Image: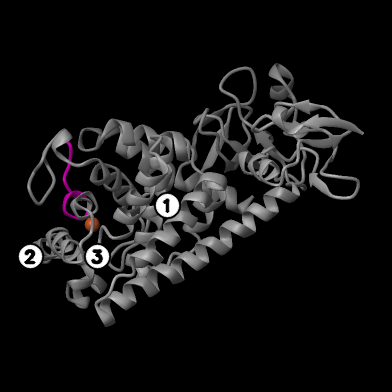
Amino acid sequence: MKKIPVSTLADGAYFDRPVFLDETYILLAPDAPVMPDLVRRLRKWKYDDVHCDGQTRVVPGYLAVAGAEAAKLAPQTIDEDIRSDEQREAARAFCTDSIAFVAGFFEAFVTEGTINVGKATEWVKQAIATVRDNRDFVMRYAWAESESERWLTLHTMRSTLLALLFGHFLKAPPVRLIELGNACLLHDIGMYKLPETLLRSKAALSTDERKAMGAHTALGYRLLKGFSAAENVALAALEHHERMDGSGYPRGLTGDRITEYARIVAVACSFEAMVSPRPFRPAGFDLHTAIRELLQKQRKQYDDRVLKALVYTLGLYPIGTHVLLSNGGKGATVRTDPARPRCPVVRVLADPSGKRPTKTLLLQSEETGGVSVVRALTPAEVKELGRT
Ligand SMILES: [Fe+2]
């Protein structure tokens, strides 16, 4: 077998044959991407070379149908690789554990009046690694539970994962990412001091009740200062409902007067609220429509850099979005690419003639020269698709 220096393993490259660590141990299945984490671990284990009989390529075999050819063909048939299965399971377990962690963390705050900063930081570190290595699957499983009774726990977990994704995109250094994660984990802590009846109300809130809810920002700030939290962590609680155009609360701050963590948490928190149910209402938007809504109608309220981070990290058609393809087929997005937010990998659910494929069909959409995503399907079209 050929020796391949670890130093030449390119991030995201694929091999067409298995890659071996030694004579017996398979490191990578064919068409599983080289991930930065793998290269890091190889270096840590002091491996200088790996072994493979095959060739590298920049796209996996099942996507290597180029240009006009791809447009004519039915999408490629593939089985999802072993690595994907492992990533999927890791993401699912992380999300389940995270819900339990966040629920327990605030349970301790409510019953014992304590905040365990060490535990929070430990979880945030895990979250940073998971969203960095496993973005798509984490996004998929973070929304797997839709129980509106637990909305505050779920909101806190999802907002924090989103904020960390944005932080990565904005190239925040590790220490700042941990601080941002802590700030987002704690941004709604003031809510836990509000009457339960308000948090669990199944009826739309009255003006007075909404005003009372709004007090969670100042309450959170005071609580966090009481726990000697860093000023910018406490300010994220105080300012995450401030808006760039001055339309927010509690102080009606504008632009740069709002601290950076608060601006990041604001997008994460608003986006989560748009796509998730509350006890008194169902989810307002699917992920794609929420992104469009934020970009088209609410743009002035949010920091442009953070909105850009939202689009590039989730993609314009986030995981699970049902889409119409330029060849007339329909499907749902299963992978996104931060470098090309318009070009997700789509699981085909109806071929161009409207038939449901008998095998798993995945298609890499292209902006030009292949099958592209035309638009997201309407709710009626999604329902119709379910019947085919
Ligand atoms: Fe809030």
Counting residues from the N terminus, which is met first, the one under dot 3 or under dot 2? Answer: 3
Residue at screen point 17% across, 49% down: 239
Residue at numbered disc 1: 161
Q: Quadrant of residue 334?
A: top right
Q: Position of residue 131 (x, y in %)?
A: 50, 48
Looking at the image, residue 110 sits to the left or right of residue 356; the answer is: left
Between 243 and 117, the one lying in front of the other is: 117
**How far apart in space, not on screen, are marks 1 and 2 (Cα)?**
31 Å
Residue at numbered disc 2: 208
What type of secondary structure mainly makes up the magenta span? loop
Q: Residue furthest front?
A: 46
Ligand 1 image position (quadrant) = bottom left
Q: Secondary structure at mark 3?
A: helix
Counting residues from the N terminus, which is met first, the one under dot 1 or under dot 2? Answer: 1
Residue at numbered disc 3: 189
Indicate whether residue 242 is drawn in magenta.
Answer: yes
Badge 2 crowding class, 10 Å Cα cut-off, few under 14, some 14 to 19, many 20 or more, is few
Looking at the image, residue 35 sits to the left or right of residue 128; the answer is: right
